[in-house]
Image (tube, rainbow, N blue to C red):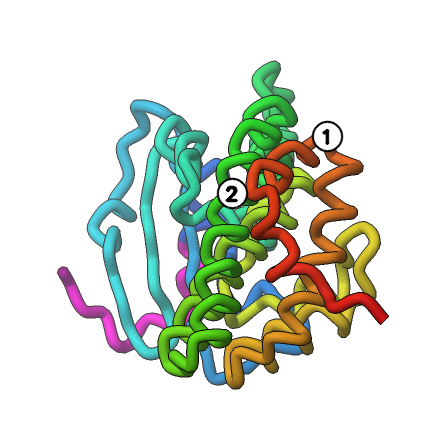
Amino acid sequence: MTAHPQLSHGAFVALATADPAVVGLVLKGSRAHDGMTRHSDHDLYVVLAVDSATGLSRFSGRRGAELDLVVVSLTEFRAAGMPPFERYALARARIVLDRLDRLDRLDGSIARILADKALLDAGEALRTAGTLLDAYVNSLYRSVKNHRDGQALAARLDAADSLGFLLELLFTLDLRPRPYHKYLRWELDRHSLPRWDSGVLPDAVDRISATGDVGLQRWLFARVEGVAGEAGLGSVPDVWGDDLALMRPDEP
């Protein structure tokens, strides 16, 4: 790793823009999310034309207080985040430079590549959703059962586990990569999930993760059952049979 403490974000962008080997600059992380902290550094992908030689390669992996750089070829950039690592970051990334448009490339543009990363394949998402739903129900069942049996710590831990599966499920059903925890409220405030008020879901997740509130878990599960049924996944929780009574809200 080479340190370049004197290199600012603006200076590097000017340097990269002047280099014909650079076909794209993509900003990710907090700086790409309006209203997030401005104490963050600039996380920048530098995308190079395939087989292009450039002196900018010396900056690859550079990390500093203001600037973190990843220098990749166009081929590598297409594959970044696919599978999921980095996918959300790139789905909400901001384009600083897109020369593929100007080059009239037949294989798309930086903007098109990012748009593809932001949209999950419908068939694959539906198959994944069934597995996620089953994992969510399993952790939920463990939580409410442990609560019933007086195992408070175990109940809270299982509740926390269930929320990760739940969030992955809901974003998968909407064909979107799940946001990192830091950006959950940001994402829902600007891009709500179908059938969910932007504040209801994160508030419920917050309370359940802190307290393991069983009544709220059951209320949430009832909502999820409806969403799952609309998606054609109603048979997944149904296999739990009589155990569903422990997970559903008490009858009035």
Residue placed most toward the observer, 70 or 121: 121
Is 31 on the left-hand or right-hand side of 195? left
Label 1 crowd bin: few (<14), some (14–19), many (20+), radius 10 Å: few
Q: Is residue 176 above or below residue 12?
A: above
Instruction: Give the number of callouts.
Output: 2
- Residue span colored magenta: 1-15
The amino acid marked with disc number 2 is Asp
Please tell me which residue is depicted at 59% across the width and 25% down the height of the picture: 103
Name the residue rendered at 62%, 52% in the picture. Answer: 244
Query: Where residue 124 appears, x then y in whole percent?
Result: 55, 25
> Which sits in the foreground, 245 or 54?
245
Image quadrant where residue 199 sits: bottom right
Residue 4 higher or lower than 12, as above or below: below
Q: Is residue 93 visible?
A: no
Which kind of residue does numbered mark 1 sit on? Gly
Q: Which residue is mark 2?
A: 134
Q: Which residue is mark 1?
A: 232
Q: Residue furthest front?
A: 242
**Number of the label disc, if any, that sits on residue 112:** none
* Outermost residue to the left: 1
Left or right position of 150 against 182: left
Residue 10 spot, x, y in % from top left: 48, 68
Q: Element under label 2?
A: helix
